[in-house]
Image: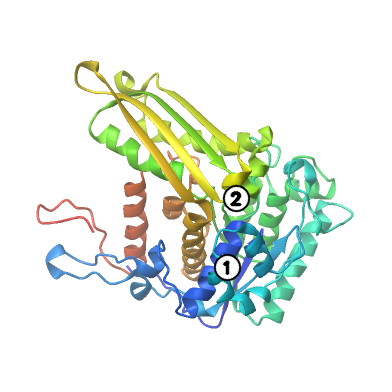
């Protein structure tokens, strides 16, 4: 049965937390260039991927953007918050992800995008030096200021709908605690300036309170507290996260399913990264790195299921390192040494050296999530959008289910959700005549 999906009338406002960061400015410059038809949206499923409809012999492979009523990228209006008061062209030049010749093509439009002052607390991101932040009598007051920003942006830019996405820095590690068990308790904690209320939680609350879908692109404990999940359900707001799956973890969600599919054993997986951008500097703080480490480490156990295959995966050693190395800038290098074994226990090795641009991999993810989350809200979907796990290292999930990390299962789930939205039968690949899409 086809979902009742509201048409994407008017314009869609996109509010980015961390507006001047490398990921954000790379995304913004790219969208502006794509809309001017001087670049193409490589890496984006919503813009470039097809989806099979019906049986294989029908040969129907429409583009996702034609199959679903997604918002057109020309109808996006951008704004957001940052700890630096400079326009996005200046920030993009400083980030040095994109070449100057490419940025100059969109200089006029990019220069017009400027941030609002951010909600920030130094202890949550120790290595960041803010210069453009809000002040208030307590965290509840700061949240109300964010809500006012959201309403003002919507009115001034004459947008019909909004999506908020976190592209800011990784906060220090916080485990899920049971003290924030309800909306009432959470509100009281904000008024009392509770130490465990991080800025990302304040943004999430403000978004949900305004009926705005919220996407957590970092490993922060942001929207995934009992109180905020309850609030999202109550407000009929979709939420998604967490931590964009870009470089090394993307490779893990491809290689580890292969090992499991062939029943090859694993003795150890050592991963190290060098990164020189602001993200690398933030993660140089041990408490911020802990947040990222937990996100990265969760992938292998979930995919390999050592409790089911103890002979293959019960005792493998998994180590993750991120090293701040300024000369590399946004050009991240992820190196993996994987010790595996096969027939009769004979050892083998895999070596992966992934030299990538972190923001180049993240930018199309940002675009897809914005468009899909807007679609989810127009489809009257609420709470955790597990079908978007494809994009995240540590995907949010319901308490009573095991998270899915296998990239290809995630992709099938995403596409089947899109088919279901449009009243089309899911593809199961059970017929002998079927092939993969």
Residue 67's tag is none
Instruction: Indicate left or right for 185 with 325 as reference.
Output: right
Query: Residue 201: x percent and y percent?
Result: 69, 50
Say which of 93 and 191 sits in front. 93
Residue occupying the point 40% across, 22% down: 316
Residue occupying the point 71% across, 37% down: 179
Say which of 404 and 127 sits in front. 127
The residue indicated by pointer 1 is 100
Residue sticking out furthest to the right: 137
Pointer 2: residues within 10 angstroms few (<14), some, or many (20+)? many
Query: Residue 88: x percent and y percent?
Result: 66, 68
Residue 19 visible in this rendered orientation of the protein: no
Q: How is the image coloured?
A: rainbow
Task: Check the image and report above or below for 148 versus 10.
Answer: above
Residue 229's tag is 2
Quadrant placement of the C terminus = bottom left
Residue occupying the point 60% across, 45% down: 327
Query: Residue 97: x percent and y percent?
Result: 56, 58
Residue occupying the point 62% across, 76% down: 107
Give SS at disc 1. helix
Quadrant placement of the N terminus = bottom left
Pointer 1: residues within 10 angstroms few (<14), some, or many (20+)? few
Residue sticking out furthest to the left: 432
Query: Residue 404: x percent and y percent?
Result: 40, 43
Residue 432 visible in this rendered orientation of the protein: yes
Say which of 155 and 110 sits in front. 110
Give SS at disc 2. helix
Instruction: Verify CB contact (< 8 Å) between mark 2 and mark 1.
Output: no
Q: Between tags 2 and 1, which lies in front?
A: 1
* Distance of label 2 from label 1 (alpha carbons): 42 Å
């Amino acid at each position: 049965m086809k979902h009742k999906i509201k048409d994407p009338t008017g314009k869609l406002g996109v509010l980015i937390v961390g507006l001047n960061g490398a990921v954000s400015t790379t995304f913004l410059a790219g969208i502006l260039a794509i809309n001017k038809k001087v670049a193409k949206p490589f890496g984006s499923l919503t813009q470039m991927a097809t989806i099979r409809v019906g049986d294989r012999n029908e040969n129907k492979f429409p583009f996702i953007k034609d199959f679903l009523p997604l918002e057109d990228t020309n109808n996006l209006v951008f704004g957001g918050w940052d700890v630096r008061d400079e326009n996005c062209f200046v920030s993009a030049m400083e980030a040095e992800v994109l070449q100057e010749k490419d940025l100059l093509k969109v200089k006029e439009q990019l220069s017009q995008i400027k941030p609002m002052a951010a909600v920030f607390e130094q202890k949550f991101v120790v290595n960041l030096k803010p210069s453009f932040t809000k002040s208030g009598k307590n965290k509840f007051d700061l949240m109300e200021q964010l809500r006012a920003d959201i309403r003002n942006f919507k009115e001034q830019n004459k947008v019909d709908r909004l999506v908020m996405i976190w592209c800011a820095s990784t906060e220090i590690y916080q485990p899920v605690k049971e003290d924030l068990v309800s909306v009432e308790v959470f509100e009281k904690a904000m008024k009392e300036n509770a130490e465990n209320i991080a800025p990302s939680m304040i943004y999430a609350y403000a978004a949900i309170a305004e009926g705005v879908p919220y996407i957590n692109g970092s490993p922060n404990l942001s929207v995934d507290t009992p109180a905020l999940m309850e609030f999202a359900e109550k407000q009929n707001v979709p939420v998604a996260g967490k931590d964009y799956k870009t470089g090394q973890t993307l490779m893990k969600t491809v290689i580890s399913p292969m090992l499991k599919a062939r029943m090859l054993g694993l003795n150890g997986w050592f991963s190290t990264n060098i990164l020189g951008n602001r993200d690398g500097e933030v993660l140089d703080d041990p408490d911020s790195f802990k947040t990222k480490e937990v996100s990265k480490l969760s992938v292998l156990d979930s995919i390999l299921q050592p409790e089911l295959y103890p002979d293959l995966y019960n005792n493998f050693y998994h180590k993750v390192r991120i090293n701040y190395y300024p000369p590399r800038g946004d050009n991240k290098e992820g190196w993996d040494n994987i010790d595996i074994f096969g027939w009769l226990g004979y050892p083998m090795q895999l070596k992966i050296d992934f030299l990538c641009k972190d923001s180049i991999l993240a930018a199309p993810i940002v675009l897809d999530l914005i468009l899909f989350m807007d679609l989810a809200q127009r489809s009257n979907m609420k709470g955790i959008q597990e079908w978007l796990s494809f994009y995240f290292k540590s995907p949010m999930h319901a308490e009573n289910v095991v998270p899915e990390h296998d990239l290809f299962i995630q992709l099938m789930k995403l596409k089947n959700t899109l088919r279901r939205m449009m009243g089309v039968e899911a593809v199961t690949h059970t017929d002998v005549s079927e092939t993969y899409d």
